[in-house]
Image (cartoon, rainbow, N blue to C red):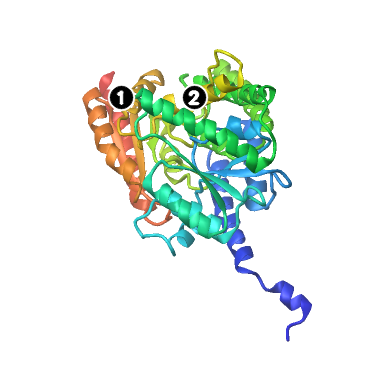
Amino acid sequence: MMSEPQERAIETSQQRHARHQGMEASEVLDVVEKSFSGNPKAMQYFYDLFRDVYCNGVKTHSGKETIGTMCVQIPDEIIHAAGGIPVRMCNGFYTDEEIGGEFMPAKSCSLVKASLGMLKSETNPYSDGIKTIVNPTTCDQKKKAAGMMREMGYQVYDMELPPVKESEEGREYWRRSVRKFTQEVTRITGKKITKKGLKETIRKVGQAQIAYHRLNDLRKHTPVPILGKDIFMLTNAYFFDDLECWTQAAEALCGEIEQRVANGFNAAGRHSPRIIFTGSPPVFPNLKIPLMIELADGVIVADETCSSNRLLNDMVSVDEWFMYDMVDAVADRYLKSCTCPIFTMNDDRIRRLIDLYRSFHADGVIYQAFSGCSVYEMEQRSVAKAMEKEGIPMLYIETDYSPSGTGQLSTRIEAFMESLKARRRNKR
């Protein structure tokens, strides 16, 4: 029989998994912090936040009613107004992708496998005690994932999206879905949503968006004052950080970046190609491709992804501050501006990419698609055709969370950077 100290010394599978998560996160954070010079001082808040949560096991919302969300389409304003804390479950750990791969098809999307792997292992780094997960009926894999999450013991609420967003029928379908969710979330939290409370949360989320828009506009400058890897860190922190703390930290970063612009500070190389990043979302710690781009002397000046730009893009526009008007306005904010490829028509996304390319004075587009993510894999052909028509260089990369194969990917990215530099020289 083992003694009590011996029993305590045995590492449980959960503890071992959490330790591996911490190691994976620490390696990426070391690259983010130490492989680039001139990091903004205000970014230290975000670096420390990720180390605390992912490496040191600090729970940011212990004792609070946290509600897991599986998509950017879930209305944060409604959850906050009901006294809940929205925490996005989309996950970037290769450690968790391996676990998800044990019970999911081999060709499944890396993000879905990793998210379910985290829930299966019960090593959620964000907070303790998540019982309810709001899951959107977006891609087929997330739809089927709902059943698996229920089998794991989670309460899952299916948030229904229409397949078409342009029609009045689709808009009304989504509004009814958000109204229904507004009633359901009060049952989950036990707190009634009031007109005053919803108005206040719309204001708070709006303040966060204003800070992000302010920062995003600063990225249009030449030379570029901040690297894209820091923007992905900032927006990924929005997934789980306290809303007001995040906003204050983002505003502090804006102030520093404005000073950099005034001083002509260049965060990248003198001839670094300016890149628009799009496709499957970079979710920490899977920042593999963005980091490769910027380590190869590129700089991501803007993106069209649901883990960054799309997360905080359009704001709620309210005509009348009555409850039903506010709920419908929140619904419209999430549907009208959405450029997710799950919709049958997606001309908005192509227009958005072209606009980003022009307004951010970019040199090229890099399109990432996770292996098994059928919607992004299928849509890249129409995006590539549109980019070619506009004379915009685009590199398509299909990858997963695995650290293997990075050498070949780096070679392709470096070659693309060199081609963009040559293209720019030829234009002079």
Alpha-carbon neighbours of circle 1 within 10 Å: few (<14), some, or many (≥20)? few
For residue 333, which numbered disc appears in the image?
A: 2
In this view, the residue in front, 311 or 27, is 311
Label 2, residues with CA under 10 Å away: few <14, some 14-19, many ≥20: some
Give percent across and percent down for residue 280: 40, 41
> Residue tagged by mark 1?
424
Taking depth in this image into account, of 19 and 28 the one nearest to the observer is: 19
Above/below status of 202 relative to 410 = above
List x then y, in percent, for residue 45: 66, 36
Inspect the image, locate mark 1, and give the three-letter code of the amino acid beneath it. Answer: Arg
Residue 193 in view here: yes
Q: Is residue 309 visible?
A: no
Quarter of the image holding residue 258?
Answer: top right
Residue in the image at 61% along x and 18% along y: 322
Which quadrant of the view contains residue 4? Answer: bottom right
Q: Which residue does the image show at 30% across and 37% down from the upper left? A: 395
> Does residue 425 sit above or below 375 in this rendering?
above
C-alpha span from label 1 to label 2: 38 Å
SS of the residue at dot 1? helix
Q: How far from the left and from the top, in percent, is residue 365?
A: 34, 32
Q: Amino acid at mark 2?
A: Arg
